[in-house]
Amino acid sequence: MNLRTVSTTPFNDQKPGTSGLRKSVPVFQKLHYLENFIQSIFDSLEGIAGQTLVVGGDGRYYNREAIQIILKMAAANGIGKVLVGQGGILSTPAVSCIIRKYQTFGGIILSASHNPGGPEGDFGVKYNISNGGPAPEKVTEAIFARTQEITEYKILEAADINLDRVGSFKLGTMEVEVMDSVVPYLELMESLFDLEKIRQLVTGGNFGMCIDSLHAVTGPYARAIFEQRLGAKEGTVQNGIPLEDFGGGHPDPNLVYAEELVKVLFGEDAPDFGAASDGDGDRNMILGRRFFVTPSDSLAILTANAHLVPGYQDGLAGVARSMPTSEAVDRVAAKLGIDCYETPTGWKFFGNLLDANKATLCGEESFGTGSNHIREKDGLWAVLFWLNILAVTGKSVEQIVREHWATYGRNFYSRHDYEEVASEPAQQLITELEAKLPTLVGQTLGNYEVKYADNFSYTDPVDGSVSQKQGIRLGFTDGSRIVFRLSGTGTKGATLRVYLESYEPDVSQHQRDTQEALGDLILLANEVAKIQEFTGRDKPTVIT
Ligand code: VG1
Ligand code: CO
């Protein structure tokens, strides 16, 4: 076995975004591209020699090749041991779980999450730290800085490891342990939920459900949990085998991309419950019979009902939501008398709050919910949380949501995405809008009076770090909001996200259609930001 030191030159585009480095597969396949980034991770982590790392991915195209490269580089860089999921498979929440359970130094997750996969699709690399969560900005900045000055990387010349067989292997002096991808995660779920009660619900004969893994990583987890452990009938999990190209689909659990599941839940003989998760398993969509639960409402409802679930029955230390997420959870927190934190978009901002026990549940409007059980959002955890609530209350999803609105009022909420628009004009839209902000405060726009207008800046209450320019917010005196930001996970052009929210206390108005209820705000958003002019689009590509 030969240790090779390979000369290389920097790539200028290896800056991690909202959630790691994401590029198209052909970019990652460029000579030295992956290697440069991995070496930059190793170089910027102090004290990594001799340590243990977790490595796994969502099974997308290039997953296995990348893992072999990473293992050989880890061995050449003096890493002590690597834990790898069988077949290279580990969901993002499972990696977080394993890092924490085995107290490893960190982990590398190979995924581009909800972005499509395949030879022309996307690939991604994300580094997680020892608390199990995404590396905070100071770490990703150090990695990026290193990518700009890298001159060489180290790799072992060795045969590939057999990733399909559970067991221990040697790679040079480094140990590689190929482990069951599901078991540690399943055990963690068992410690949080009343699986017996859920089992009774699921097998009782009066309850139907459908789980869609969208051909992505949650397949093996969902089949083990729902079909094997909880006794749901075979076939409950659809699209449950991870495919390298996700069956040509877009593994994003929303009403547009989880079309097949939506058809089932809105069809004639619709079951009682439906759920989908994304490419790497950290997102979730919850559906009732002919009923869609917005992720923002889901966070609020989990918070309001957490006392019904064993893992959270002693109460919550606090909650946190990303800034664009609706304020529904704020109302629940106020009633419970607990703190509610507002963070920038991206799970990495929840890490400190969870570590410091300031927040127990966290969520994002982008179909992400999670808790202090790990340091990532967790799709199947949210599904089990919902099932646990359904099992305890005996109510339907729709009933729970409507009762919640009746108690707290309804936050109408929608996100409009303009995907793959030209980068320069999109950036210009934000720049122009930002320049205009000071003149907007106090102005009346249509029926709305602007209360505040700013570019969101966040000071982490634990370590004092400041993150600026996290999204443009227009807040109105009646509690409505419009938020504008550019995506940090896309790989083609720019994606403009427009988040819209209004509050309706009157129960008689709660059945209104969301797009209609937000109609005035939608027009206003377009006018203020000149969306059509800058994007050339007269409507969004995806509405969630
Ligand atoms: C999007 C979502 C954000 C989420 C991120 C990663 O980021 O808006 O809420 O944390 O994806 O999710 P952006 O920058 O494109 O808006 V995932 O499932 O990739 O790990
Ligand atoms: Co994801």
Image (tube, rainbow, N blue to C red):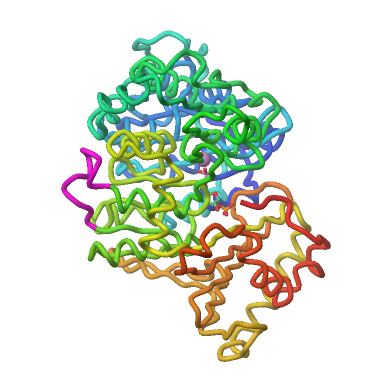
| Occupied quadrant, residue 349 | bottom left
Query: Is residue 126 among the parts visible in the rendering?
Result: yes
Query: In this rendering, is residue 525 above or below 312?
Result: below
Question: Residue visible at 44% across and 41% down?
Answer: 127
Q: Is residue 260 above or below residue 175?
A: below
Q: Nearer the viewer, residue 399 or 422?
A: 399
Q: Where residue 74 appears, x then y in whole percent?
A: 43, 29
- Residue 485, position in %: x, y? 60, 64
Total marks placed:
0
Q: Nearer the viewer, residue 281 or 501?
A: 501
Residue 539, relative to residue 523: is it above or below? above
* Residue placed most toward the observer, 291 or 382: 291
Q: Is residue 165 above or below residue 364?
A: above
Q: Can see residue 173?
A: no
In magenta segment, residue 309? yes
Residue 445 percent coordinates (x, y): 65, 84
Furthest-left residue in view? 314
Residue found 39% across the figure and 16% down from its top: 178
Image position of 506 (left or right of 335): right
**Of residues 493 and 36, the one drawn nearer to the viewer in this rendering:** 493
Residue extent of the magenta highlight: 306-317
Q: Is residue 514 magenta?
A: no
